[in-house]
Amino acid sequence: MLTSHAPSRTARRARGFTLIEVLLVIAIIAILAAIVIIAINPARQISQANNAQRSANVTTILNAIGQYAIDNRGAYPTTITTATTTICNTGVASSTAFPCVDLSVLTNNQIYLPTLPSDPTGLTVTSTGYSVIKSVSTNPRITVLAPNAELSATISVTR
């Protein structure tokens, strides 16, 4: 009686995966990965994080202006006008080509702020990316805005 040591045809076939099975698994993994990426939406997450930073920066600037007013008997920095104006970066002077509000009184000697916060996207070298306006009334209120907010958000704080 002769015995063969070679595995049968069906035994050889059962050892590995076929090309179709491997491709099918790869396709399923790709579809699941696409669904997860769409659900997480990293671009939206980054935009929301930028808006949260803008909101914190607007509040920080307004708090510094409020502290300045408290220390100066209710007087706000004289550079703040009744027109919505961009806030200059520290060390940038307002000019006719680039009109902006110089709030260096807040950063002098780092009494109120060490530096003025800038928009998280870093749009320009001359501007912080934020604006300020003083209302026209006998008891003026200050509003600080983030005009570059993403996702159609409106970020402003008034006191």
Image: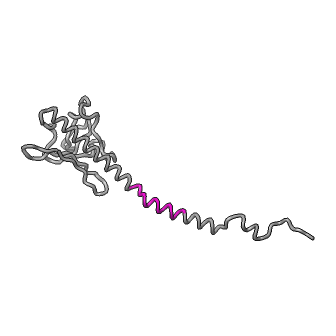
Quadrant in the picture for residue 76: top left
Q: Say whether residue 39 is magenta.
A: yes
Q: Relative to 30, is 142 on the left or the right?
A: left
Residue furthest right in the image = 1
The residue at the far top in this view is 109
Q: Residue at x 22, y 48 (%)?
A: 145
Chosen colour scheme: one colour
Looking at the rendering, the stretch of residues picked out in magenta corresponds to 29-43
The secondary structure that dominates the magenta segment is helix
Q: Nearer the viewer, residue 157 or 3?
A: 3
Q: Which residue is located at x 72 percent, y 67 percent?
A: 14
Rendered location of residue 152, percent (x, y): 28, 57
Residue occupying the point 12% across, 47% down: 135
Residue 99 appears at what percent x and percent y?
19, 44
Whether 37 is drawn above or below 74: the answer is below
Picture coordinates of residue 92, whole percent (x, y):
25, 37
Outermost residue, front side: 1
Q: Quadrant of the N terminus?
A: bottom right
Quadrant of the image occupied by residue 77: top left
Could you tell me how many numbered marks the image carries? 0
The residue lying toward the viewer, choosing from 77 and 137, is 137
Residue 62 image position (x, y, % from top left):
21, 42
Q: Is residue 43 left or right of residue 104?
A: right
Residue 88 vertical position relative to residue 51 in the rendered view, above or below: above
